[in-house]
Image: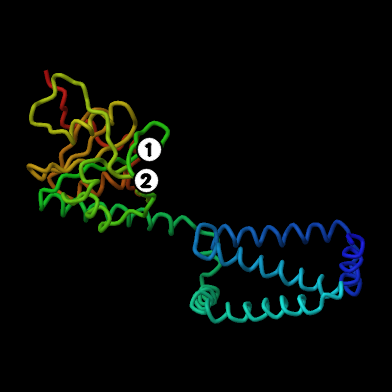
């Protein structure tokens, strides 16, 4: 049976008069590379990924129907082939908006630049994260809603796994919902990695500094404790006063305006350019910190 299938494929390839050589191998590698690039660029981790898998399944069914017809199982083969044809035509109608957007993207003047340049797109996305956080903090401070947000690049030394996993895009609406007093997750911390909220309701280690002033509550103590055991930056909004602070390396910086807060958040998330950072090696100027460990 296998020999008959191989003979059938040879009969399909024979009219093409192909003489396989190293040039053909190079062409195949180029085609695979192009397909893989488009898959990584436009398809992977999107809703279209399932569509592509379905398309490959249709191709497999079409090949299988041709094999059935070849072995005189014409009724089943023709039936499968008809189903594949009908589904393929229906997909054009179902995914018409996506196809229209893709063709519109191909028709843009700077299509090539957008295809290979990810820097502007990624930077804009991260700046939007800063905007979402600042808008959230503005509401938290005004309404005296307590909040604790942890920014961390290295998730190997954190406590996010003891919270509720979200893995959601950062948005003002989601942050407001999480820290609303009537929600189950409002007492814990939110862990943000890049532009994703990894988890919420996270319990952080409290600082054990006996000299810490009594005026700092649980959220501030958790932020200080987290910054003592990791390289994370912790943003805290006080429920009693509405004050906004960021804690790093066991020190706390209080903010009186959103402009300074936005600038420091851009530094933390790596948004600012080298010119804007003025070749700074640290996120904050040390003399701007309010030292919380007082004798």
73 shown above or below 226: below
Residue identified by numbered label 1: 161
User: In the displayed structure, does residue 58 sit left or right of residue 120?
Assistant: right
Q: Disc count in the image?
A: 2
Q: Which SS class for mark 1?
A: helix
104 shown above or below 187: below
Q: Residues within 10 Å of mark 1 (few under 14, many from 20)?
A: some
User: In the displayed structure, does residue 80 sit left or right of residue 87?
Assistant: right
- Find residue 7 and report its image quarter: bottom right
Please state which of residues 268 and 8 is positioned toward the viewer in this rendering.
8
Q: Which SS class for mark 2?
A: strand
Across and down, in percent, residue 271 comes to 36, 49
Across and down, in percent, residue 145 comes to 14, 48
Instruction: Please identify the quadrant where the N terminus is shown.
Output: bottom right
Residue 288, visible in the rendered structure? no
Q: How is the image coloured?
A: rainbow
User: In the displayed structure, does residue 276 sit left or right of residue 285?
Assistant: right
142 shown above or below 57: above
Instruction: Please identify the quadrant where the C terminus is shown.
Output: top left
- Residue shown at 39%/31% (left/top)? 157
Q: CA distance from mark 2 to mark 1?
A: 7 Å
Residue identified by numbered label 2: 165
- Residue shown at 59%/60% (left/top)? 39
Residue 119, visible in the rendered structure? yes
Please state which of residues 39 and 118 is positioned toward the viewer in this rendering.
39
Q: Residues within 10 Å of mark 2 (few under 14, many from 20)?
A: some
Across and down, in percent, residue 6 comes to 89, 63
94 shown above or below 125: below
Across and down, in percent, residue 236 comes to 20, 41
Q: Are marks 2 and 1 in contact (CB under 8 Å)?
A: yes
């Amino acid at each position: 049976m296998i020999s008959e299938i191989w003979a059938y494929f040879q009969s399909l390839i024979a009219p093409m008069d192909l003489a396989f050589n190293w040039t053909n191998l190079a062409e195949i590698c180029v085609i695979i590379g192009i397909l893989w690039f488009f898959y990584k660029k436009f398809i992977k981790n999107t809703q279209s990924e399932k569509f592509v898998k379905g398309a490959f399944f249709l191709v497999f069914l079409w090949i299988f129907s041709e094999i059935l017809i070849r072995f005189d199982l014409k009724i089943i083969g023709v039936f499968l082939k008809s189903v594949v044809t009908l589904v393929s035509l229906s997909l054009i109608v179902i995914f018409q908006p996506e196809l229209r957007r893709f063709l519109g993207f191909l028709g843009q003047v700077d299509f090539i630049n957008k295809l290979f340049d990810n820097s502007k797109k990624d930077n804009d996305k991260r700046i939007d994260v800063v905007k979402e956080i600042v808008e959230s903090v503005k509401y938290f401070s005004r309404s005296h809603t307590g909040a604790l947000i942890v920014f961390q690049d290295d998730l190997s030394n954190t406590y996010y796994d003891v919270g509720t996993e979200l893995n959601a895009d950062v948005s003002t609406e989601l942050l407001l919902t999480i820290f609303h007093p009537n929600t189950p997750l409002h007492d814990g911390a939110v862990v943000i990695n890049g532009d994703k909220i990894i988890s919420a309701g996270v319990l952080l280690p409290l600082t054990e500094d006996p000299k810490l002033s009594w005026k700092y509550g649980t959220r501030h103590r958790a932020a200080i404790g987290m910054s003592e055991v990791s390289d994370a930056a912790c943003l805290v909004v006080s429920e009693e006063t509405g004050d906004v602070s960021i804690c790093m390396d066991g020190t706390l910086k209080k903010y009186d305006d959103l402009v300074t807060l936005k600038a420091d958040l851009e530094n933390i998330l790596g948004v600012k350019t080298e010119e804007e950072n003025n070749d700074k090696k640290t996120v904050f100027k040390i003399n701007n910190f309010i030292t919380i460990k007082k004798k």
